[in-house]
Every structure is written in structure tokens, then in C-alpha cells.
Amino acid sequence: MRLNGSQIIIECLVEQGVDTVFGYPGGAVLNIYDELYKNSDRINHILTSHEQGASHAADGYARSTGKVGVVIATSGPGATNLVTGIATAYMDSSPIVAITGNVGNNLLGRDSFQEVDITGITMPITKHNYIVKDITKLADTIREAFLIARSGRPGPVLIDIPKDVTAAICEYEPKKINFHEQIKQLPIIFDYQLEDIAKMILEAKRPFIYAGGGVIKSNTSKELNEFANLLEIPTSTSLMGIGAFDQTDPLSTGLIGMHGSVASNKAVVECDLLITLGARFSDRVLSNHKHFAEDAKIIQIDVDVAEINKNIKVDYSLVMDLKEFFTRIKKYLTKTTHKEWIEKVNGWKKVFTDNQKSQALKPRYFMEAIYEATKGDCYIATEVGQHQMWAAQYFTYTKPNRFISSGGLGTMGFGMGASIGTQLAHPNDYVFNIAGDGSFRMNFNELLTLSKYNIPVCVVIANNGVLGMVRQWQTAFYGRRYSQTILDNKLNYEYLAKACGVDYYYADTKETYKKAIEEALKNRRPCIINAMVLIDEKVLPMVAPGKPIDELMLE
């Protein structure tokens, strides 16, 4: 059949199983939006308040489902407004496809109105990107983009399409998509390599697992839990790995790294074997790399060869998919126990008692009340800052894909868009966006998106009147010189909520906060809970930059 470029885009999106896209129209994508209008029964388009919000929404959709998220923006500023969202997805290996319009082929390179070289701009922050100048290559390019986005280590792909291509006509042939198809670029792993690793694991006296986001991306959380319990190995996760291991399991030691638990950080120093699964040894985990697991042998299993020996030298590595790793290594493993090691790790779990057990409203209660009200069955999106760490530390995560947060890039403003994408992907579930008053200001324009579509996200603002994490660093390392971290308090959150058409709750005690959560869950409407936090609440434990990971600041 003969179709124009815009029709081909729609057909290819439907081929890929896309039911929801996020975006903002403009001149260079008008042809595409005309087809979206005609095909609104097949693809639901969500109009956000800003292209950055759309990119984060596509990202949240992708993280919470494992599917590819889609965002559309026009040329020039529309395209550049996606850059932060694309970089966020790239750092956290989130599969999104960004479709941008551009000026016509005859206007490219002439500094035309709203022209920008978006493929050049995004080259370092995409797995791959394209500019499609030939209509006959459009369909195959879109199909390849989706395949790249979801293959191996997932990530963002951008397709830039000149306006004349969206209007041009060519022959189009439908294609049935195999969603399990992957681009195979991995080396062959021999049985003896798995035997070697199994031997190292079975001989270890103090083994420890460090699991990252790769476990979630490879859909192997169940396998990880079985693996750890078969071998009785204490298990920690990175920020991106939260939910990969059931935190109600006695073997769970929680978060590892700068704001990790005492048990995780002590165990990684005293273990004799560190098994690293789908994790990249980021600086927020390593701290001082010379003192990280310095007396242990280190095994690293990762699908991305670029991560092997990048930040820390390992003793044995395999570049392979974790699903294949867990499946194939089973036959070389037997049930093991490590009674003394487990007792020692459990002792570390009792070392640190924070100041959060209080009659006053504390950050711990923010998360415990949500857990109690939902029985843990909800999605937690976050902005970036102290509140992000409190959300990571004080909620009990038992399932993967439930913690939606910007780890690698640390993008303030991420949570508003991400919570929208998450809620639309899971309309019958509860979604909370845990925000700080600083991060909230970055993208609160997306309250209008919540209101427009009646998306029942509950935004919990940990309101301490300051940029809390920066202030915490200024307190610890900059002699309490609070340069530009005190926010003015002239913003009236109640009036803002009313202006945007969302519900508002004020909470300054445990009782008012608990009531607000209960009301939000009962009403199922978009809302803000303005929860007051003391100005100098801290995120603890904390490892000072450059210090060994087991030298934790506990007060």
C-alpha cells in the first residue's frame, strides 16, 4: 500500500505495540500530529506542559513496564527540550524512542527557523540516532530504532525526520514484529567459565552480592532471589537495583554506597568474594575505589562489555545476559550455608539506629505510612535530593520496577513526568511522586497534565524550605555557609493546587499526614500533600566523598 511518511510512522508505532505516546506539537511535526488525530482510537497521545516532562513521562512508562517509551517533539527548541530527558534515560539504561521533526531537506544546514542539529547534539547520550532524509528508509529505520532501544543494555534512540519526509509518499509493507528479537553482540560463553565461577562461589567463606539495575532490565529478579537463597549469600542493591531483591528477605542488606546501609557497606569491605550482577560500580557506590572490596575477589556479570574493568578491576568477568547466566550456572551449584558470616552481617544491621522514631512527623514516616496504606503495593517515583534517598531507605521494596528514580544523571524535576508515565502505564495502581520543594519547582507545570487527564498521582512534597541535600553538604563540608540554598517561602502550595485543578492537603503531624494519604487513596484524584520537614533533617548514613565505603557518618 502507498502511504505518506506520517502514516508510516503511525503504522510502525502500532506494529511495535505502542499504545501511548507523550509529546508537544509544533510546525515540523504537524503532519505527524494530523495522523495522530486520525488514529486517536489506536494511539493515545498525552499532551504535557513541556517537552522535558514528556521525555520523563516516556521514561517512567518504560521503567515501570519494561516496554519502549515514546516521545514526540518538534524541531529546534522542542527537540533540545528533550535533551535532559534523553540523557536521564541514557544514564539509567531506560529504553525510549524520541521522534523529532526537523525543517525540510532543502532547508537543512541553512540556519532555518527552528532548525537544530539534534542528532549531533544527542550523539553522546543515545545508543544510536538517525536523521531520515529518504522516505523509503523510514519504516525500517523506526523498526531498527525500537530493536536497538530494547536490545542488550537498553537505552534511548532518537529519530529526526525532516518535514517533507513526513509528507512524501512511498510503498509500505506491514511487518510482524518479534518482541523477543535481540541484536546479538555478545561473546560465546563456555561451560568451563561458568564452572570456574561456580567453584569460586562454593569455595567462598564470606560471599556478598551487589546487584544493580541490570537485574531489573533483564527481568531476572526471581532468579536473583533463588540464587541468593540457594547459596545463602547476603545481597545488596544499587539505587537502580532497588526492588531486584525482596527487601523482606532476611538475606537483604538494602542499599549500598554513599547512603547505603551499615550492613551493605561493611559487608562489601569484609567479604572474600563480591558477586556483581548487572551493576556498573558507579562513584556513588565505590566512593574510594582503592578501598572497595580490597581483600575480596570480584566477579562481574554484565551485558555491556564497556562496563567490565571500567571503574574497578575485577578478577573474573562474563559479558552475558543475566537470564542466560542464572539458567546455565544452576547445574554447577549446590545448596550452601554461611552461618557465621550471616550472623556477622545481621549484627551490622543492628548497629545504626537513626533519629526517625519520633512522635513528630519524620521522613521515615512519609514512606512507612504509604507502605501501610497500600500494603507496599504501589509505585514510588521520585525527584532528586534528600527525599529521593528517604524514599530509597524507608520504603520496603519487594518487587522490581516499583522504584522509579533518576540515579545516574540525578535529574531534579524527573519525578513529575515519570510519575505521569508510570500511572498511565498502570491505571489501576497507586503512584506516588516523592518530591522536595526544590525539585518540585523544576517541573510543577506538569500538575496541569495531571489535572487535564485526571491522572491520580499523589505528589508528596517534603517541604523543608531549602535545597536539602546541598544544604546537608554545606553543613558537613562547607562550614555551614548556606550559599543560595534557602528557598523563599512565598509559593502558596494550596493556591497553586487550586489554580491547577488538583487536590491539596497540608500535613505537619503524623496524624494529618496519615489522614492525607488515606484521603488521596480513597479519592483517586491528582493531589499534592504539602508535608513539613525540619530544615536540618539529614540523610544518614552517609559516606564522605573519597572516604572508604565503610567509614560511615552516622550523625
Image: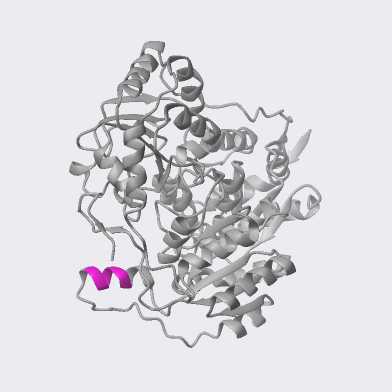
Q: Is residue 517 at all visible to an observer of this figure?
A: yes
- How far from the left and from the top, in percent, is residue 347? 33, 47
The answer to whether residue 426 is left or right of residue 150 is: right
* Residue at image point 75% right, 51% down: 35
Q: Is residue 114 at all visible to an observer of this figure?
A: no
* Residue at image point 60% right, 78% down: 512
- How far from the left and from the top, in percent, is residue 56? 54, 56
- How far from the left and from the top, in percent, is residue 151? 52, 32
The quadrant where residue 146 appears = top right
In this picture, is 187 found above or below 264?
Answer: above
Instruction: Name the residue nearer the viewer: 105 or 339.
Output: 339
The answer to whether residue 481 is left or right of residue 94 is: left
Instruction: Name the residue nearer the viewer: 84 or 143.
Output: 84
Helix, strand or loop: magenta stretch: helix
| Colour pattern | one colour
Report the magenta residues as a range: 471-476
Q: State the count of labels.
A: 0
In this picture, is 391 found above or below 7?
Answer: below
The answer to whether residue 351 is left or right of residue 384 is: left
Instruction: Name the residue nearer the viewer: 421 or 546.
Output: 546
Instruction: Name the residue nearer the viewer: 77 or 454.
Output: 454
- How far from the left and from the top, in percent, is residue 391? 48, 60
Q: Quadrant of the C terminus?
A: bottom left
Q: Is residue 473 magenta?
A: yes
The quadrant where residue 199 appears = top left
The answer to whether residue 523 is left or right of residue 149 is: right
* Residue at image point 64% right, 62% down: 373
Q: Is residue 331 magenta?
A: no
The quadrant where residue 291 appears = top left
Q: Quadrant of the N terminus?
A: top right
